[in-house]
Image (spheres, rainbow, N blue to C red):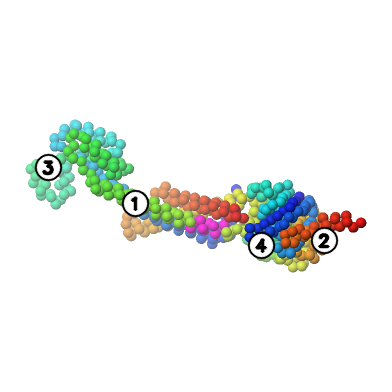
Amino acid sequence: MNLVFREALLAFRRAPLLSALSVTTIAFSLFVVGLFGLVAVNLQQALRDVAERVEIVAYLLPGAPIETVTLAQKDIEAFPEVQAAAFVSEDQALQRARTELVEFRDVLQELERNPLPASIEVKLKPRFRDAEHVNDVAERLRGFGFVDDVRFGRDWVEKLDRLRQIAAAVGLVVGAAFAAVAIIIIGTTIRMAVLQRSREIAIMRLVGATDGFVRRPFLLQGAFKGMLGGLVAVGLSYGAYALINRWLIHAAFFSREQAVAIVGFGMLIGFVGSAASVGRHLRRV
Amino acid sequence: MIKFTNVFKAFPKGGLALKDVSFHIAKGEFVFLTGHSGAGKSTVLKLVYAEEPATSGEVRVSGFNLAEARRKDIPRLRRRLGIVFQDFRLLEDRSAEENVAFALEVTGARRASIPARVMRVLTQVGLAAKAQAYPRELSGGEQQRVAIARALVNEPTVLLADEPTGNLDERATRGVFQLLRDINASGTAVVMATHDLDLVRQAPYRVIELQEGALVFDSAVDERRDEAASP
């Protein structure tokens, strides 16, 4: 094992330019993937923020007994989809209208009778904020006898759904394309490293090295270059993120797990790419 | 130890390289493999070290039947052979001793034993003083000595040499040839492909001659037949 490490490191020393080139290529390929990832992450975040506003409001019939409503509220909170259910009394509704609808303050001041109904505002758990579940919960709310009407902005929720689907599809296709390009470029770079050492490989085999012995330093080296490339790519992505965040828009960066995944992806491509290149080379000689 | 029986070798694009070649080389023998360029000398050697498979016929080397040998058996076979080429095939970025040590390292030799074994073979080929020199700092003859040291360090039973003096001047040729004779004298069989007939005439060794892929002369067989026919 000692020797494998030494041979792998020796390759960096003997061909520093090619090694640096491989690491740079891997880094920039992954950087492109990373940039796209950043866009995806921020788009997701934006959609989550919008989805945060998905709310179902059940307006109550006037004079619904408060005990019944409180009990129903508990029931609603127990729905698996529901994150929170808040009771808003008639007075609270008016209070809120007065502060929020400044333009109508005068009208609202002069009211003799409060025209606003009491309501229960229901917020769903993040993963249930789509048209299907919203509909479903709204339907169940309608089942309560004291509920007059249920509103949730159907069009809006459906549009959000559509937007999410498009984002997911585009993310998948474009992400896969970027990843494929990265894999091809990285694979070619590694192939160059193998070809550069083909003479050495031939001599190794001539003096009786097993295929495994020839392969191992390359695998180690490939994984190492991939890891370095991944780290540089995360660094570059962070730089890009910092710039965007400072000068353009407030953006989000990868979570620790996502950053680790990028480095891991680099390592994996380096390893698999090397295995494929050396394997192909060995089968031919 | 090396036995060819009715061996044919066809290359996909090069036609028939060997035609019905049979011979047997015993332990400790010194054999010249002669013939013009393209006669099949290198092909015979490639078949011996399992670089190429025979198209038909049987090749046996040091107990291996190469038709049955699988890819993973080849390294074990090669460790019993020493191979030397006209173009030396040294690694340019390693010193003489590192080139020799390389052959031990790849076979998984004990680390501690390597330096002593390397120095011993470098001394044997007369290059102990230049152990730290890189190939570019050595003359052709010296580079070939390093290559021979590398071939010897695993204590092979046979040394295969493909035109080992082809790139050397006369003086270096004599030196390398003498070295091969010394190696043979200590018990290692040597198979030397060469078209240098002066060299062949210098020594009383067995000669196998190839012509367009066919074995046309084998001094071991033909002389015996001559002796049988003469009285």
Q: CA distance from mark 3 to mark 1?
A: 42 Å
Label 2 lies in what chain?
Answer: B
Q: Residues within 10 Å of mark 1 (few under 14, many from 20)?
A: some
Q: Which residues are magenta?
A: A185-194
Q: Position of residue A238 (x, y in %)?
A: 40, 55
Q: Which mark is residue B203?
A: 2
In the displayed structure image, the side of residue B13 where residue B160 appears, left or right: right
Residue that carries the numbered disc 1 in the rendered image: A167
Closer to the observer: label 3 or label 4? Answer: 3
Please report contact status of discs 1 and 4: CB closer than 8 Å, yes or no: no
Determine if residue A49 is in view. no
* Chain under callout 4: B
Characterize the magenta stretch by its predominant secondary structure: helix
Q: Amino acid at mark 4?
A: Tyr
Residue B42: image location, x then y, percent: 70, 59
Secondary structure of the residue carrying tag 3 is loop
Q: Which residue is mark 3?
A: A115
Tell me if residue A193 is in the magenta stretch.
yes
Q: Are marks 2 and 3 in contact (CB under 8 Å)?
A: no
Q: Amino acid at mark 1?
A: Ala
Whether the residues at callouts 2 and 4 have beta carbons within 8 Å, the answer is no
Query: Looking at the picture, does residue B189 appear above or below residue B166?
Result: above
Q: Residue at x 8, y 46 (%)?
A: A110
Q: Secondary structure at mark 1?
A: helix
Same subunit, labels 2 and 3: the answer reads no
Front residue (pair B96, A173) = A173
Left or right of A55 on screen, residue B126: right
What's under tag 3, amino acid-wise? Answer: Pro
Q: CA distance from mark 2 to mark 3?
A: 123 Å
Mark 2 residue element: loop
> Farthest residue in the bottom direction?
B169
